[in-house]
Amino acid sequence: MLSSKAGIIATLRPAAGHLVSPRQKPPSLRPSACPGLLRIVQALDGGICRIKLAGGSISSEQAGAVADAAQQYAGGVIEATNRANLQIRGIGNEHAALISLLLDAGLGPSTDAGDDVRNVMLSPSAGIDRQMRFDIRPLGAQILHSLETLPHLHDLSAKFAVQLDGGEALAMLMHPHDLWLSAIELDGEPMLAFGLAGCPVDEPLGAVPQALGHELVINVLEVFLELARPDQTRMRHLLAELPVRDFMAQLTGRLSERPTNVAGWDRATASMPLHIGTYPQRQHGFAYIGAGVPLGRLDPHMLRGASQLAKVYGDGNVRFTPWQSLLLPGVRLEDTSVVTEALSQLGFLCSADQSLVHLIACTGSTGCAKGLADTKNDALQLAALLQHHGHVLSVHLSGCSRSCAAAHVTPVTLLAVGPGHYDLYFRDAGQPGFGALHARNLTIEAVAAMLDARSRSPLDA
């Protein structure tokens, strides 16, 4: 918990709805308008508080606190984000009370200045995945501690992010991160391959022993802060001007051991949506159960219900995933059907055959001033039409070109151009952004008909 909670929540900026620490810390070189736990940002539907979860995991007691906060001080809307965090929407004027409740539950940073930079994403099945090479969670905790407690790292942007991949079958491999590390074995030694401004499916820049993972991360962050201008908030901004070899030369000179070259890199991807359904864990006799959060939104009743199931049948924790879903780990094999049925009754999506599992939609015009369409309701309509046609397609509905709801490009993107109308894009590796523009100004019905026709075309078989 923060050392001076009473002081931290004492001062508010009513106009902007931003929390101000009384310590008068100089403003960051890279200020951000992103919400955090200690910075509630105003949107069209009220304030937004983002709760960054360590490793995407939250205890059943903490989940109850989030549900209470959303119900007592906001409109009852809780969102699962695409970086395995939670956020509360529709917050009223009682910012301090909401923040205090969350801090008391242990959901805040250990220092007030450390909240923005706690951006470390782990594979959702870290420590329990049968395919993992080693448990990445201790390294994640070590990195988080350093990010929170080392003052010079607080000048990182609130968007600067690190990904840790232990070789799990269930791993998000398509979200670009400023720094990624992925478990590998070289000559029988556990190592961490790494890369900059990309994903674990990219060619690594090198590998270091597992024991040097923390040293590597801290030095990458320090080199970035020394070389990047304040306007270069992300690694990709810096590397657009600075050759990677120059960055690596600076980095290598600081490390206690020179990185090893990695030949023939091939980070295998899973062919199934392993975040939905029941899957055996590394621990004998146990399984994790994955369930989708419809369009990334759940209410306090759903969150309390899931946390109670975790407490009674699981290991007492709920894990959120970058697919806007959750996992209940540590469930005995004989209890999985009971838990799955209970999750379904709560309103979670428990089958990958449900079209809604594969749809992503941003907040849209009901909660965001930049949204040109009610993406959430349009997505529900599209899901029903796709289900009727028997299609399971990955579709992203974006209310504007910022693409807030998806950090990666989906096979199909609908970009709003007005209420109920969208431009249709298909992913194309040869084209930037959403891909190839296929049709303009379509209604949801027209989109469904066009996707149905495309799926039946022999050219796409």
Image (spheres, helix red, strand yellow):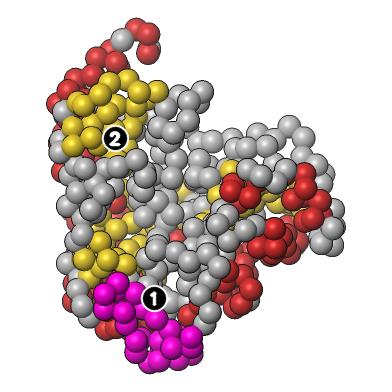
In the image, residue 408 sits, relative to residue 35, either above or below, namely above
Q: Which residue is located at x 43 percent, y 88 percent?
A: 22
Name which of mark 1 and mark 2 comes first in the sequence.
1
- Rendering quarter of residue 149: bottom right
Q: Residue beneath label 1, please?
A: 38
Amino acid type shown at disc 1 = Leu
Q: Quadrant of the C terminus?
A: top left
Q: Position of residue 51 (x, y in %)?
A: 38, 68
| Residue 135 position in % (x across, y down) | 61, 58
* Residue 23 on the magenta segment: yes
| Position of residue 419 in the picture relative to residue 324 (left or right) | left
- Choose between 232 and 378: the one closer to the eye: 232
Magenta residues, start to end: 1-24
Which residue is more in the foreground, 27 or 407? 27
| Residue with the most extreme top position | 458
Residue beneath disc 2: 415
Residue drawn at (17%, 67%), measured in percent from left and top?
75
